[in-house]
Amino acid sequence: MLNPQIVLFLCATLFCIGLYGVLSRNNLILMLMSLELMLNSANIALVAFSRYWAGKGLDAGSFSGAHSGQFFALMVMAVAAAEVGVGLAIIVALFRKRHNSDVRAASELKH
Amino acid sequence: MEVFFLLSSMVAVAGAVLVVTQRVAIYALLGLLVSFFGTAGIFYALDATFVAVSQILVYAGALAVLFLFVLMFASDDPPEAGPLVTVGARKDFDPAAVKPVEARARPRLSMPSFGAALLSLAVLALMYFAIYKLPPRFGEFGGVAPQTQVHKTNPRPGEPLTEMVEFGSARGVGYAIFDDFPLAFEVVSLLIFAAILGAVLLTRRSAAQSRAEQEAAAREGEAGAEGAGGSHA
């Protein structure tokens, strides 16, 4: 049988790979991609806890609450989609001004 | 299901490693896509069918395509080199010096950045330690009954108070969304609306800007026509 600890180890691994990507890249698009990886790993943890709740039957025979984790995962997806939309718009606006998508080129708030 | 979980998690981790190591942005995006599909497999192995499907729809279907569009639009290399070129700022960029993609010797993987590697490894060790220290009573995932009842909070008159749903099905998650957390659902719709407005405002050109660009283009066109006429004569 699957172990929640294994799933959490996987989440931690994916999260840290994404963290490494965000820290080591200079390109905004690639940083945004790594950020998506981190959000995804959080989603896996939420779904794993939802599955754990359903398996333990914490709600005594019904799982009205067990779907909460999956609901939160869906909300995280919506927030991630909004974030990528705005982030990519910022990248496009930056690219018009600076003609590259390097974070070091965007060190000023004024254009 | 365990084997399926392990396979999908390997796919997800492999895709994630591609995302952070590839120098070519399109390949990194493909790695991200692979990782999304692996994650969908993990969701399926955890009995979250609806979340798995929406993962593929939202991430692989919409986000990856959006990334692809911006990557093709905002790549730092000239268009004739194609999209399969390296990304990253090059201050001393000279379009004349660009060779075709095949001819250029470019590193396939980016150099590891030691500070970033050190910090993320430290975070990884901390998380592993915390997960390893989980109390033993945490145990394993129990089995899930094929159907279990949910309590409706707002049943219509005459409807039963409970309903039998499958765990992870659209019906079950729908009860969670519209019965348990309707306010969060509404707030998220506001958030997405704000994001749409923000994206449009950020990428919109002002009237003065587009007029200036048109004038510049017209001037260039005139200059080009004159030059062509001169050479012809």
Image: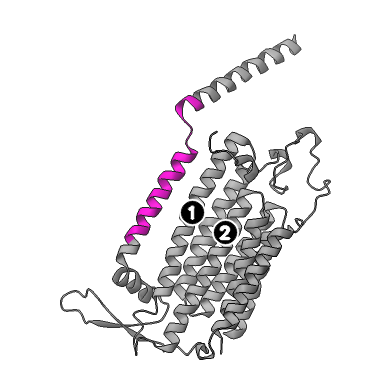
How far across and down, in percent of the image, does residue B216 sit? 58, 21
- What is the C-alpha distance between the residues marked 1 and 2? 10 Å
How far across and down, in percent of the image, does residue A98 sit? 62, 36
What span is in magenta?
B186-210
Left or right relative to B51: residue B25: right
SS under mark 1: helix
Mark 1 crowd level (few <14, some 14–19, many ≥20, 10 Å Cα): some
Q: Are marks 1 and 2 in contact (CB under 8 Å)?
A: yes
Q: Residue A23 sits in which quadrant?
A: bottom right
Left or right relative to B173: residue A32: right
Picture layout, residue B26 above or below residue A97? below
The image's mark for residue A12 is none
Outermost residue toward the left in this view: B157
Q: Which amino acid does label 2 sit on?
A: Leu
Parent chain of label 2: A
Q: Which of B24 and B79 is in front in this view?
A: B24
Parent chain of label 1: A
User: Which residue is under mark 1?
Assistant: A83
Mark 2 crowd level (few <14, some 14–19, many ≥20, 10 Å Cα): many
Where does the N terminus of chain A fall, quadrant-wise? bottom right
Picture layout, residue B118 above or below residue A102? below
**Residue B104 part of the magenta-drawn span:** no
User: Which residue is under mark 2?
Assistant: A35
